[in-house]
Amino acid sequence: MKVIPELCDICGTCVAVCPVDAITVSEFRVDIDNEICINCLNCLKVCPAKAIEEGE
Ligand code: SF4
Ligand code: SF4
């Protein structure tokens, strides 16, 4: 999973729905740790800005 920084408005919605806490949010950016991510797609579904996309 990856966050498209240009679209993300750092609302924090994705962080709340991640079951494994793979998403970290700072003042300036949101990051997904793909070592932890289990590809549940919760974040992608809830992102109001469509700023998360599925990687390979
Ligand atoms: S796909 Fe699921 S596990 Fe991976 S970052 Fe998004 S919410 Fe978390
Ligand atoms: S839900 Fe989308 S817009 Fe909000 S912080 Fe996550 S990636 Fe960014």
Image (tube, rainbow, N blue to C red):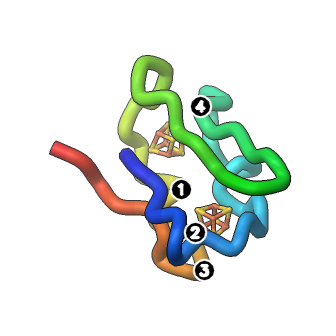
Q: Which amino acid is tagged 4?
A: Ala
The 10 Å Cα crowd at callout 1, few under 14, some 14 to 19, many 20 or more, is many
The answer for how far apart the CA atoms under marks 4 and 3 are is 19 Å
The 10 Å Cα crowd at callout 3, few under 14, some 14 to 19, many 20 or more, is some
Q: Residue at x 54, y 56 (%)?
A: 43
Mark earlier in primary sequence (4, 3): 4
Q: Residue at x 35, y 61 (%)?
A: 53
Circles 1 and 2 in contact, beta carbons < 8 Å: yes
Q: Where is residue 3 in the image (x, y as percent from the top left)?
A: 47, 56
- Pointer 4 residue Cβ closer than 8 Å to ligand 1: yes
The answer for how far apart the CA atoms under marks 3 and 1 are is 10 Å
Q: Position of residue 20 (x, y in %)?
A: 61, 27
User: In the rendered image, which quarter contains the C terminus?
Assistant: top left
Query: Residue 48 got which mark?
Result: 3
- Pointer 3 residue Cβ closer than 8 Å to ligand 2: yes
Q: Which amino acid is tagged 3?
A: Pro
Circles 4 and 2 in contact, beta carbons < 8 Å: no
Helix, strand or loop at label 4? It is: loop
